[in-house]
Image (spheres, rainbow, N blue to C red):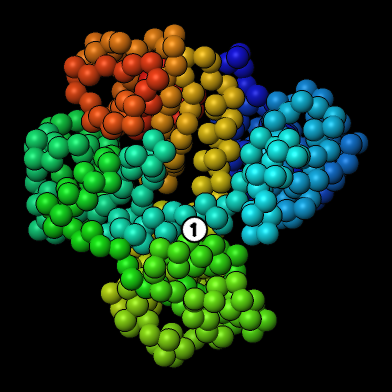
Protein backbone atom coordinates (compact mmCIF):
# COMPACT_ATOMS: atom_id res chain seq x y z
CA UNK A 1 0.00 0.00 0.00
CA UNK A 2 1.12 3.53 -0.70
CA UNK A 3 2.69 5.50 2.12
CA UNK A 4 0.48 8.49 1.30
CA UNK A 5 -1.74 9.79 4.06
CA UNK A 6 -5.22 8.37 4.33
CA UNK A 7 -8.40 10.32 3.65
CA UNK A 8 -10.31 10.12 6.95
CA UNK A 9 -13.79 11.40 7.83
CA UNK A 10 -14.69 11.79 11.52
CA UNK A 11 -18.33 12.34 12.51
CA UNK A 12 -18.77 13.88 15.95
CA UNK A 13 -16.54 16.76 17.04
CA UNK A 14 -16.39 15.82 20.71
CA UNK A 15 -13.57 14.94 23.09
CA UNK A 16 -12.45 11.82 21.26
CA UNK A 17 -12.19 13.71 17.98
CA UNK A 18 -10.16 16.43 19.70
CA UNK A 19 -7.81 13.77 21.03
CA UNK A 20 -7.07 12.16 17.68
CA UNK A 21 -7.44 14.80 14.96
CA UNK A 22 -4.19 16.65 15.65
CA UNK A 23 -2.27 13.36 15.82
CA UNK A 24 -3.76 12.13 12.56
CA UNK A 25 -2.93 15.43 10.85
CA UNK A 26 0.62 15.39 12.24
CA UNK A 27 1.06 11.90 10.77
CA UNK A 28 0.16 13.19 7.31
CA UNK A 29 -3.48 12.20 6.98
CA UNK A 30 -6.17 14.25 5.25
CA UNK A 31 -8.88 14.67 7.91
CA UNK A 32 -12.41 16.03 7.58
CA UNK A 33 -14.55 16.55 10.70
CA UNK A 34 -18.36 16.53 10.49
CA UNK A 35 -20.69 17.95 13.15
CA UNK A 36 -24.07 19.67 13.26
CA UNK A 37 -22.66 22.51 15.40
CA UNK A 38 -21.07 25.23 13.21
CA UNK A 39 -19.28 26.82 16.19
CA UNK A 40 -17.52 23.56 17.04
CA UNK A 41 -16.55 22.97 13.41
CA UNK A 42 -15.14 26.50 13.19
CA UNK A 43 -13.04 25.85 16.33
CA UNK A 44 -11.70 22.62 14.81
CA UNK A 45 -10.68 24.17 11.51
CA UNK A 46 -9.05 27.09 13.32
CA UNK A 47 -7.01 24.94 15.71
CA UNK A 48 -6.21 21.94 13.46
CA UNK A 49 -5.14 21.69 9.85
CA UNK A 50 -8.30 19.84 8.85
CA UNK A 51 -11.44 20.36 6.81
CA UNK A 52 -14.81 20.89 8.46
CA UNK A 53 -18.34 20.14 7.27
CA UNK A 54 -21.44 21.32 9.10
CA UNK A 55 -24.28 18.82 8.84
CA UNK A 56 -25.84 15.53 9.86
CA UNK A 57 -23.32 12.73 9.41
CA UNK A 58 -26.15 10.25 8.78
CA UNK A 59 -27.28 11.95 5.55
CA UNK A 60 -25.89 11.31 2.08
CA UNK A 61 -25.72 15.02 1.25
CA UNK A 62 -23.43 15.72 4.20
CA UNK A 63 -21.24 12.67 3.59
CA UNK A 64 -20.97 13.53 -0.11
CA UNK A 65 -19.75 17.02 0.81
CA UNK A 66 -17.24 15.45 3.23
CA UNK A 67 -15.85 13.27 0.43
CA UNK A 68 -17.20 9.81 1.29
CA UNK A 69 -16.72 8.59 -2.30
CA UNK A 70 -12.91 8.74 -1.97
CA UNK A 71 -12.47 8.29 1.79
CA UNK A 72 -10.22 5.51 3.07
CA UNK A 73 -11.62 5.52 6.60
CA UNK A 74 -14.82 6.67 8.29
CA UNK A 75 -14.99 7.11 12.10
CA UNK A 76 -18.25 7.81 13.94
CA UNK A 77 -17.73 9.00 17.53
CA UNK A 78 -20.87 10.99 18.39
CA UNK A 79 -22.47 10.64 21.82
CA UNK A 80 -25.13 8.29 20.40
CA UNK A 81 -24.38 4.60 19.76
CA UNK A 82 -27.32 4.33 17.41
CA UNK A 83 -26.26 7.37 15.39
CA UNK A 84 -22.71 6.04 15.12
CA UNK A 85 -23.95 2.71 13.77
CA UNK A 86 -26.33 4.46 11.36
CA UNK A 87 -23.59 6.78 10.09
CA UNK A 88 -21.30 3.82 9.40
CA UNK A 89 -24.08 1.90 7.64
CA UNK A 90 -24.85 4.82 5.33
CA UNK A 91 -21.14 5.48 4.70
CA UNK A 92 -20.74 1.87 3.50
CA UNK A 93 -23.52 2.39 0.95
CA UNK A 94 -21.79 5.29 -0.79
CA UNK A 95 -18.09 4.54 -0.48
CA UNK A 96 -15.46 1.92 0.22
CA UNK A 97 -14.10 3.35 3.47
CA UNK A 98 -13.21 1.17 6.44
CA UNK A 99 -15.78 2.10 9.09
CA UNK A 100 -15.21 2.48 12.84
CA UNK A 101 -17.99 3.13 15.37
CA UNK A 102 -17.91 4.03 19.04
CA UNK A 103 -20.46 1.86 20.89
CA UNK A 104 -20.80 2.09 24.68
CA UNK A 105 -24.07 0.34 25.58
CA UNK A 106 -23.52 -3.05 27.27
CA UNK A 107 -26.48 -4.50 25.32
CA UNK A 108 -24.76 -3.72 22.04
CA UNK A 109 -21.44 -4.91 23.41
CA UNK A 110 -22.88 -8.39 23.91
CA UNK A 111 -23.63 -8.45 20.17
CA UNK A 112 -20.43 -6.80 18.98
CA UNK A 113 -19.42 -9.65 16.68
CA UNK A 114 -22.85 -9.77 15.05
CA UNK A 115 -22.97 -5.99 14.56
CA UNK A 116 -19.47 -5.87 13.10
CA UNK A 117 -20.18 -8.66 10.61
CA UNK A 118 -23.68 -7.61 9.56
CA UNK A 119 -22.87 -3.90 9.24
CA UNK A 120 -19.46 -4.45 7.66
CA UNK A 121 -17.64 -2.52 10.38
CA UNK A 122 -13.85 -2.65 10.53
CA UNK A 123 -13.83 -1.88 14.25
CA UNK A 124 -16.15 -1.21 17.17
CA UNK A 125 -14.65 0.85 19.99
CA UNK A 126 -15.97 0.82 23.55
CA UNK A 127 -13.96 3.36 25.60
CA UNK A 128 -15.56 2.46 28.94
CA UNK A 129 -14.99 -1.28 28.51
CA UNK A 130 -11.36 -0.84 27.45
CA UNK A 131 -10.72 1.58 30.32
CA UNK A 132 -12.15 -0.81 32.87
CA UNK A 133 -10.09 -3.69 31.49
CA UNK A 134 -7.02 -1.57 32.22
CA UNK A 135 -8.31 -0.72 35.70
CA UNK A 136 -8.90 -4.41 36.43
CA UNK A 137 -5.36 -5.31 35.35
CA UNK A 138 -4.00 -2.71 37.79
CA UNK A 139 -6.14 -4.01 40.67
CA UNK A 140 -4.76 -7.50 40.04
CA UNK A 141 -1.29 -5.97 40.66
CA UNK A 142 -1.92 -2.84 42.76
CA UNK A 143 1.75 -1.89 43.17
CA UNK A 144 1.78 -1.03 39.43
CA UNK A 145 0.76 2.41 38.21
CA UNK A 146 -0.07 1.10 34.75
CA UNK A 147 -0.12 -2.26 32.95
CA UNK A 148 -0.13 -2.74 29.17
CA UNK A 149 -0.56 -6.14 27.53
CA UNK A 150 1.37 -7.43 24.48
CA UNK A 151 1.86 -10.63 22.47
CA UNK A 152 -1.71 -11.80 23.05
CA UNK A 153 -1.15 -11.68 26.81
CA UNK A 154 2.22 -13.45 26.82
CA UNK A 155 4.07 -10.25 27.84
CA UNK A 156 3.25 -7.03 29.67
CA UNK A 157 4.78 -3.66 30.33
CA UNK A 158 4.26 -2.31 33.85
CA UNK A 159 4.92 1.16 35.22
CA UNK A 160 6.30 1.58 38.76
CA UNK A 161 7.62 4.35 40.97
CA UNK A 162 10.86 3.55 42.81
CA UNK A 163 10.33 4.32 46.53
CA UNK A 164 12.88 5.66 48.96
CA UNK A 165 15.34 3.00 50.11
CA UNK A 166 14.43 0.55 47.37
CA UNK A 167 17.06 -1.88 46.07
CA UNK A 168 16.94 -0.18 42.65
CA UNK A 169 18.05 3.18 44.05
CA UNK A 170 21.58 3.89 42.82
CA UNK A 171 21.77 0.82 40.57
CA UNK A 172 22.68 0.93 36.88
CA UNK A 173 20.22 -0.67 34.47
CA UNK A 174 22.92 -3.12 33.32
CA UNK A 175 23.27 -4.32 36.93
CA UNK A 176 19.52 -4.81 37.16
CA UNK A 177 19.60 -6.89 33.99
CA UNK A 178 22.30 -9.14 35.41
CA UNK A 179 20.32 -9.76 38.61
CA UNK A 180 16.89 -10.28 37.02
CA UNK A 181 16.57 -12.59 34.06
CA UNK A 182 13.91 -11.82 31.48
CA UNK A 183 13.22 -8.22 32.61
CA UNK A 184 14.03 -5.02 30.70
CA UNK A 185 13.64 -1.42 31.89
CA UNK A 186 12.37 0.37 28.77
CA UNK A 187 11.74 3.95 29.88
CA UNK A 188 12.48 6.20 32.85
CA UNK A 189 10.80 9.45 33.86
CA UNK A 190 12.74 11.69 36.24
CA UNK A 191 11.66 15.18 37.26
CA UNK A 192 9.31 15.35 34.29
CA UNK A 193 12.00 14.31 31.79
CA UNK A 194 11.54 11.06 29.84
CA UNK A 195 14.54 8.90 28.90
CA UNK A 196 14.91 5.74 26.80
CA UNK A 197 17.81 4.43 28.90
CA UNK A 198 21.06 2.63 28.09
CA UNK A 199 22.73 0.07 30.35
CA UNK A 200 24.84 2.65 32.17
CA UNK A 201 21.83 4.75 33.24
CA UNK A 202 21.69 4.89 37.07
CA UNK A 203 18.26 4.68 38.68
CA UNK A 204 17.19 6.84 41.62
CA UNK A 205 14.33 6.79 44.10
CA UNK A 206 11.40 8.79 42.74
CA UNK A 207 12.01 7.59 39.18
CA UNK A 208 8.98 6.23 37.34
CA UNK A 209 10.02 3.25 35.23
CA UNK A 210 8.39 0.99 32.65
CA UNK A 211 9.41 -2.67 32.64
CA UNK A 212 8.82 -5.25 29.89
CA UNK A 213 8.63 -8.93 30.85
CA UNK A 214 6.40 -11.95 31.08
CA UNK A 215 4.06 -11.95 34.06
CA UNK A 216 6.05 -14.72 35.74
CA UNK A 217 9.35 -12.86 35.34
CA UNK A 218 8.16 -9.46 36.47
CA UNK A 219 6.41 -10.94 39.51
CA UNK A 220 9.71 -12.58 40.52
CA UNK A 221 11.50 -9.28 39.90
CA UNK A 222 9.01 -7.31 42.00
CA UNK A 223 9.40 -9.74 44.89
CA UNK A 224 13.18 -9.40 44.59
CA UNK A 225 13.04 -5.62 44.95
CA UNK A 226 10.48 -5.70 47.76
CA UNK A 227 7.18 -4.90 46.02
CA UNK A 228 3.88 -6.52 47.04
CA UNK A 229 2.54 -8.74 44.22
CA UNK A 230 -0.85 -9.69 45.67
CA UNK A 231 -4.03 -8.47 44.03
CA UNK A 232 -6.79 -6.71 45.96
CA UNK A 233 -9.59 -8.68 47.59
CA UNK A 234 -12.22 -5.94 47.45
CA UNK A 235 -12.95 -2.62 45.80
CA UNK A 236 -15.27 0.31 46.35
CA UNK A 237 -16.60 2.08 43.25
CA UNK A 238 -18.04 5.60 43.35
CA UNK A 239 -20.73 6.07 40.72
CA UNK A 240 -22.92 3.50 39.04
CA UNK A 241 -22.65 4.30 35.34
CA UNK A 242 -21.72 2.12 32.40
CA UNK A 243 -18.02 2.01 33.32
CA UNK A 244 -18.88 0.94 36.87
CA UNK A 245 -20.97 -1.94 35.54
CA UNK A 246 -18.18 -3.12 33.23
CA UNK A 247 -15.56 -2.94 36.00
CA UNK A 248 -17.70 -4.62 38.65
CA UNK A 249 -18.61 -7.43 36.26
CA UNK A 250 -14.93 -8.17 35.58
CA UNK A 251 -13.89 -7.99 39.23
CA UNK A 252 -16.73 -10.17 40.49
CA UNK A 253 -15.86 -12.85 37.94
CA UNK A 254 -12.32 -12.82 39.37
CA UNK A 255 -13.55 -13.29 42.94
CA UNK A 256 -13.06 -9.68 44.07
CA UNK A 257 -15.81 -8.27 46.33
CA UNK A 258 -17.42 -5.08 45.00
CA UNK A 259 -19.34 -2.19 46.58
CA UNK A 260 -20.93 0.46 44.34
CA UNK A 261 -22.21 3.79 45.64
CA UNK A 262 -24.83 5.37 43.36
CA UNK A 263 -27.15 8.28 44.09
CA UNK A 264 -29.97 7.36 41.67
CA UNK A 265 -32.31 4.77 43.30
CA UNK A 266 -33.60 3.59 39.91
CA UNK A 267 -30.05 2.89 38.73
CA UNK A 268 -29.34 1.11 42.04
CA UNK A 269 -32.19 -1.27 41.32
CA UNK A 270 -30.87 -1.87 37.80
CA UNK A 271 -27.38 -2.61 39.13
CA UNK A 272 -28.80 -4.97 41.77
CA UNK A 273 -30.42 -6.97 38.97
CA UNK A 274 -27.35 -6.86 36.71
CA UNK A 275 -24.81 -7.54 39.48
CA UNK A 276 -26.52 -9.69 42.16
CA UNK A 277 -23.19 -10.50 43.85
CA UNK A 278 -22.26 -6.82 44.31
CA UNK A 279 -23.22 -4.62 47.26
CA UNK A 280 -25.16 -1.61 45.95
CA UNK A 281 -25.40 1.44 48.23
CA UNK A 282 -27.89 4.20 47.41
CA UNK A 283 -26.30 7.53 48.27
CA UNK A 284 -24.00 10.33 47.21
CA UNK A 285 -20.36 9.19 46.98
CA UNK A 286 -19.34 12.80 47.62
CA UNK A 287 -20.84 12.49 51.11
CA UNK A 288 -17.86 12.07 53.43
CA UNK A 289 -19.90 10.41 56.18
CA UNK A 290 -21.43 7.93 53.75
CA UNK A 291 -17.99 6.88 52.49
CA UNK A 292 -16.82 6.31 56.04
CA UNK A 293 -19.97 4.38 56.93
CA UNK A 294 -19.55 2.25 53.77
CA UNK A 295 -16.13 1.20 55.02
CA UNK A 296 -13.64 3.18 53.00
CA UNK A 297 -11.24 2.97 55.95
CA UNK A 298 -10.79 -0.73 55.29
CA UNK A 299 -11.21 -0.90 51.51
CA UNK A 300 -8.24 -2.40 49.67
CA UNK A 301 -8.99 -0.42 46.53
CA UNK A 302 -11.07 2.58 45.54
CA UNK A 303 -12.15 3.60 42.01
CA UNK A 304 -14.14 6.83 41.50
CA UNK A 305 -16.10 6.56 38.24
CA UNK A 306 -18.42 9.53 38.49
CA UNK A 307 -18.95 11.60 35.38
CA UNK A 308 -17.08 14.56 36.83
CA UNK A 309 -13.27 14.67 36.81
CA UNK A 310 -13.06 17.11 39.69
CA UNK A 311 -15.23 14.88 41.87
CA UNK A 312 -13.14 11.83 40.98
CA UNK A 313 -9.96 13.67 41.96
CA UNK A 314 -11.35 14.90 45.31
CA UNK A 315 -12.71 11.44 46.14
CA UNK A 316 -9.33 9.83 45.43
CA UNK A 317 -7.48 12.37 47.58
CA UNK A 318 -9.94 11.73 50.43
CA UNK A 319 -9.60 7.95 50.08
CA UNK A 320 -5.81 8.20 50.25
CA UNK A 321 -6.10 10.44 53.31
CA UNK A 322 -8.26 8.04 55.34
CA UNK A 323 -7.14 4.64 54.04
CA UNK A 324 -4.34 2.67 52.44
CA UNK A 325 -6.57 1.71 49.51
CA UNK A 326 -5.08 1.38 46.03
CA UNK A 327 -6.69 4.22 44.06
CA UNK A 328 -7.37 4.27 40.33
CA UNK A 329 -8.75 7.57 39.03
CA UNK A 330 -10.62 7.99 35.75
CA UNK A 331 -9.99 11.34 34.06
CA UNK A 332 -11.93 12.48 30.99
CA UNK A 333 -10.13 15.73 30.24
CA UNK A 334 -6.56 15.22 29.03
CA UNK A 335 -5.44 18.85 28.75
CA UNK A 336 -4.36 19.16 32.39
CA UNK A 337 -2.15 16.09 32.69
CA UNK A 338 0.83 18.16 33.89
CA UNK A 339 -1.18 19.36 36.90
CA UNK A 340 -2.83 15.99 37.53
CA UNK A 341 0.55 14.24 37.56
CA UNK A 342 1.63 16.40 40.50
CA UNK A 343 -1.26 15.10 42.62
CA UNK A 344 -1.03 11.84 44.56
CA UNK A 345 -3.83 10.08 42.67
CA UNK A 346 -2.31 6.63 42.34
CA UNK A 347 -3.01 5.23 38.87
CA UNK A 348 -4.76 7.54 36.42
CA UNK A 349 -6.81 6.23 33.48
CA UNK A 350 -7.73 8.34 30.43
CA UNK A 351 -10.48 6.57 28.39
CA UNK A 352 -10.11 9.07 25.55
CA UNK A 353 -6.42 8.19 25.16
CA UNK A 354 -7.27 4.49 25.12
CA UNK A 355 -9.76 5.16 22.31
CA UNK A 356 -7.21 7.24 20.43
CA UNK A 357 -4.65 4.42 20.72
CA UNK A 358 -7.10 1.98 19.18
CA UNK A 359 -7.88 4.29 16.27
CA UNK A 360 -4.24 5.22 15.66
CA UNK A 361 -3.21 1.58 15.67
CA UNK A 362 -5.79 0.77 12.99
CA UNK A 363 -4.89 3.83 10.90
CA UNK A 364 -1.18 3.01 10.96
CA UNK A 365 -1.84 -0.64 10.18
CA UNK A 366 -3.73 0.51 7.07
CA UNK A 367 -0.62 2.40 5.93
CA UNK A 368 1.83 -0.45 6.55
CA UNK A 369 3.48 -2.35 3.71
CA UNK A 370 3.89 -6.13 3.42
CA UNK A 371 7.05 -6.33 5.58
CA UNK A 372 5.25 -5.99 8.92
CA UNK A 373 2.00 -5.06 10.58
CA UNK A 374 1.26 -3.00 13.66
CA UNK A 375 -0.45 -5.24 16.20
CA UNK A 376 -0.47 -3.14 19.38
CA UNK A 377 0.03 0.54 20.21
CA UNK A 378 0.13 2.25 23.60
CA UNK A 379 0.86 5.91 24.20
CA UNK A 380 2.83 6.04 27.46
CA UNK A 381 3.98 8.81 29.78
CA UNK A 382 1.23 11.22 28.68
CA UNK A 383 1.76 10.32 25.00
CA UNK A 384 5.39 11.47 25.08
CA UNK A 385 6.45 7.97 24.06
CA UNK A 386 4.92 4.97 22.36
CA UNK A 387 5.14 1.23 22.92
CA UNK A 388 4.38 -0.62 19.70
CA UNK A 389 4.23 -4.28 18.76
CA UNK A 390 4.85 -5.29 15.14
CA UNK A 391 4.38 -8.68 13.55
CA UNK A 392 7.27 -9.33 11.17
CA UNK A 393 6.47 -10.79 7.75
CA UNK A 394 8.45 -12.27 4.90
CA UNK A 395 10.44 -9.62 3.07
CA UNK A 396 11.14 -7.42 6.09
CA UNK A 397 14.56 -5.74 6.01
CA UNK A 398 15.32 -6.60 9.65
CA UNK A 399 15.00 -10.40 9.65
CA UNK A 400 17.97 -12.75 10.19
CA UNK A 401 20.39 -9.91 11.07
CA UNK A 402 21.94 -9.71 14.57
CA UNK A 403 20.53 -6.71 16.40
CA UNK A 404 24.04 -5.35 16.98
CA UNK A 405 24.46 -5.03 13.20
CA UNK A 406 21.26 -3.02 12.68
CA UNK A 407 21.41 0.79 12.72
CA UNK A 408 18.63 2.04 14.98
CA UNK A 409 17.33 5.57 15.26
CA UNK A 410 18.10 7.41 18.48
CA UNK A 411 15.64 6.83 21.34
CA UNK A 412 14.47 3.47 20.05
CA UNK A 413 14.59 0.37 22.24
CA UNK A 414 13.52 -3.18 21.44
CA UNK A 415 11.66 -4.39 24.51
CA UNK A 416 11.25 -8.02 23.53
CA UNK A 417 11.00 -10.48 20.67
CA UNK A 418 8.08 -12.89 20.70
CA UNK A 419 9.27 -16.07 18.95
CA UNK A 420 6.58 -18.75 18.79
CA UNK A 421 5.03 -17.48 22.06
CA UNK A 422 8.42 -17.45 23.81
CA UNK A 423 9.31 -13.96 25.04
CA UNK A 424 12.98 -13.07 24.51
CA UNK A 425 14.59 -10.04 26.16
CA UNK A 426 17.12 -9.47 23.37
CA UNK A 427 20.89 -9.07 23.39
CA UNK A 428 22.97 -7.79 20.50
CA UNK A 429 23.43 -11.31 19.16
CA UNK A 430 19.72 -12.09 18.90
CA UNK A 431 17.96 -12.00 15.54
CA UNK A 432 14.40 -11.31 14.47
CA UNK A 433 12.85 -14.02 12.32
CA UNK A 434 9.89 -14.15 9.97
CA UNK A 435 6.73 -14.74 12.00
CA UNK A 436 8.09 -13.11 15.16
CA UNK A 437 6.50 -10.10 16.80
CA UNK A 438 8.66 -7.31 18.19
CA UNK A 439 7.83 -4.71 20.85
CA UNK A 440 9.49 -1.32 20.45
CA UNK A 441 9.56 1.63 22.88
CA UNK A 442 10.36 5.03 21.39
CA UNK A 443 9.86 8.75 21.81
CA UNK A 444 9.30 9.00 18.05
CA UNK A 445 5.71 9.14 16.81
CA UNK A 446 4.08 7.86 13.66
CA UNK A 447 5.86 4.52 13.12
CA UNK A 448 3.69 2.32 10.90
CA UNK A 449 6.04 -0.65 10.38
CA UNK A 450 9.06 -2.24 11.98
CA UNK A 451 11.53 -0.82 9.44
CA UNK A 452 10.72 2.68 10.72
CA UNK A 453 13.01 2.01 13.69
CA UNK A 454 16.05 1.96 11.35
CA UNK A 455 18.11 4.93 10.23
Residue 159 percent coordinates (x, y): 30, 49
Q: Can residue 188 be seen in the rendering of this structure?
A: no
Residue at 46% x, 35% y: name it. Answer: 376
Q: Which residue is mark 1?
A: 132
Q: Nearest the camera: 259 or 225?
A: 259
Residue 161 percent coordinates (x, y): 24, 54
Residue 36 percent coordinates (x, y): 82, 49
Q: Is residue 91 above or below residue 6?
A: below
Which quadrant holds residue 268? bottom right
Residue at the far right: name it: 61
Assign the N terminus to one quadrant of the image: top right
Residue 24 percent coordinates (x, y): 59, 32
Q: Nearest the camera: 182 or 387?
A: 182
Q: Can residue 293 be seen in the rendering of this structure?
A: yes
**Judging from the image, what secondary structure is the residue with disc 1 in?**
helix
Assign the C terminus to one quadrant of the image: top left
Q: Is residue 283 above or below residue 113?
A: below
Q: Residue 429 vs residue 295: left or right?
A: left
Q: Is residue 165 above or below residue 207?
A: below
Residue at 59% x, 30% y: name it. Answer: 363
Q: Residue 27 vs residue 79: left or right?
A: left
Q: Is residue 64 above or below residue 246?
A: above
Figure disc tally: 1
Which quadrant holds residue 70? top right
Amino acid sequence: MSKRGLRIIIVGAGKIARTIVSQLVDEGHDVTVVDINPVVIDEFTQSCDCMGVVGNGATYATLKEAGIATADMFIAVTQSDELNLLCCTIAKQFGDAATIARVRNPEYNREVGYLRDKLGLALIINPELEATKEIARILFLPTALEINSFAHGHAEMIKLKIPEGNLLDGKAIAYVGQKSEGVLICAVERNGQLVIPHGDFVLKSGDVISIAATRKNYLSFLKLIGFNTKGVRDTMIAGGGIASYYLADQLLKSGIAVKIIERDPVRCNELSDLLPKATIINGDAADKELLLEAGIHHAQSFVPLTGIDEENIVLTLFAKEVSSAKAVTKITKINFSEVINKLDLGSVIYPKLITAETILRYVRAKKATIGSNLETLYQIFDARAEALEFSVNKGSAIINIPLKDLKFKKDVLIGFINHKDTIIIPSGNDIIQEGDSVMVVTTHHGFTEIEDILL
